[in-house]
Image: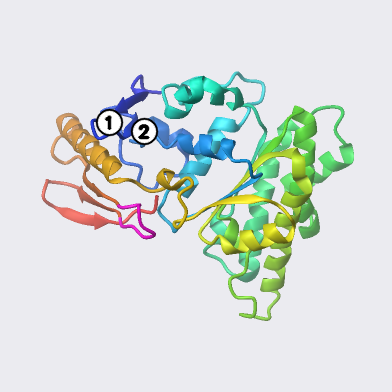
């Protein structure tokens, strides 16, 4: 990691950058916080973590259109809360950030403290019917495989561990996969003697948009997965430290959680809670502009005029819709093309 990472650079505009290394790039097509912090210019949005931890509701529902940084924020939350296995946590990742300093350091008590289940349903968003259901179950399979090594404690139910093993090996039935999430929460809580954190990206792909669209069984399959997901959240109860759902539509989760008597707090374009942690304010845009121009100058010095130089970053996030464009000079300066990223 660069020595300049997490220097907590604060510009005169008031926005704060996490990585001010000369070679850092803008976070275009970057979704993994642990990777982006080492190579990208990131605005310090770490107080999103504080808002989630301070929420009295067990479920946080964060909904924005594509491009507002939902995946990055969820990845950042995972990096902060997840307890590493048999290793000391690397505090350098968040040292100097706003969350590290806030509240006299009280949020540090929850750093690297919990087993975390992270389900990314993004791959299912571009699929339909059985393909979408298979992608959703595939996310559960991959997470079972990632967390299986943590289930070695002798006091765990061998029958339940064998279920997770079958799922991880890809030999489980759909019914076994659907049951795996609840079992995994239970096993992790016992193995770590700690509450579990559940994070789900693109949760709403599980919820069919048009219930009467087709009669091919695909809607029934998605409805079954949706019931499984929200039933698991409701049944887990106190086993979960928190659940954070990211998506574009708040309605399906609000309806499903209300039906099951689960309290939640919503962050949408029409609410103020967590609003400034999605997208960019005008001040943050100005800081990114200045920093990206500085990066372009550095790259030109090092690599010559044929370096790729990110020179313009325009964003608006205080309304429900936004646009982002980056002008890229790919060879000699002056050859400009417009790129619209999905961050």
Q: Nearer the viewer, residue 58 or 160?
A: 58
Q: Which residue is mark 2?
A: 39
Q: Is residue 166 left or right of residue 32?
A: right
Q: CA distance from mark 2 to mark 1?
A: 8 Å
User: Which of the colour schemes (rainbow, by chain, secondary structure, one colour) is used?
Assistant: rainbow
Residue 11 x, y percent position in the rendering: 26, 30
Q: Which residue is mark 1?
A: 23
- Specify start and end residues of the magenta stretch as a single range: 316-323
Residue 65: name its quadrant: bottom left
Q: Looking at the picture, does residue 315 appear above or below residue 10?
A: below
Residue 6 visible, this angle: yes
Q: Is residue 185 left or right of residue 19?
A: right
Taking the magenta stretch, the answer to whether it contains residue 174 is no
| N-terminal-most mark, 2 or 1 | 1
Q: Residues within 10 Å of mark 1 (few under 14, many from 20)?
A: some
Residue 13: name its quadrant: top left
Residue 24 x, y percent position in the rendering: 30, 33
Q: Is residue 15 left or right of residue 182?
A: left
Q: Nearer the viewer, residue 74 or 108?
A: 108
Residue at 30% from the left image edge and 41% from the top image edge: 284
Residues tagged 2 and 1 counted as in contact (Cβ below 8 A): yes
């Amino acid at each position: 990691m660069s020595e300049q990472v997490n220097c907590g650079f604060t510009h005169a505009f008031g926005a704060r950058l996490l990585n001010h290394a000369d070679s850092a790039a803008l976070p275009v097509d970057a979704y993994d916080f642990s990777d982006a912090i080492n190579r990208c210019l990131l605005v310090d949005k770490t107080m999103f973590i504080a808002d989630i931890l301070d929420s009295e509701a067990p479920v946080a529902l964060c909904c924005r259109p594509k491009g507002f940084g939902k995946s990055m924020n969820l990845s950042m939350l995972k990096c902060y809360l997840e307890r590493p296995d048999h290793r000391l946590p690397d505090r350098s990742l968040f040292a100097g950030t706003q969350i590290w300093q806030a509240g006299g350091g009280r949020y540090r008590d929850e750093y690297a403290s919990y087993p975390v289940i992270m389900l990314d349903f993004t791959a299912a968003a571009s699929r339909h019917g059985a393909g979408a259901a298979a992608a959703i179950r595939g996310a559960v399979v991959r997470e079972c495989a990632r967390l299986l090594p943590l289930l070695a404690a002798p006091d765990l139910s061998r029958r339940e561990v064998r279920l997770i093993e079958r799922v991880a090996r890809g030999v489980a039935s759909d019914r076994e996969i659907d049951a795996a999430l609840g079992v995994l929460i239970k096993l992790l809580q016992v193995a770590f003697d700690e509450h579990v954190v559940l994070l789900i990206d693109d949760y709403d792909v599980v919820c069919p948009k048009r219930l009467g669209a087709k009669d091919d069984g695909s809607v029934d399959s998605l409805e079954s997965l949706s019931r499984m997901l929200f039933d698991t959240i409701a049944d887990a109860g106190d086993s979960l430290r928190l659940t954070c759902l990211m998506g574009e539509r708040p309605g399906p989760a609000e309806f499903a959680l209300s039906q099951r008597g689960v309290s939640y707090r919503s962050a949408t374009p029409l609410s103020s809670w967590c609003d400034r942690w999605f997208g960019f304010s005008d001040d943050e845009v100005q800081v990114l502009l200045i920093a990206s121009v500085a990066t372009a100058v550095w790259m030109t010095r090092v690599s010559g005029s044929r370096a790729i130089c990110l020179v313009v970053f325009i964003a608006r996030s205080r309304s429900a819709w936004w646009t982002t464009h980056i002008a890229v000079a790919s060879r000699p300066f002056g050859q400009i093309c417009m790129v619209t990223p999905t961050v």
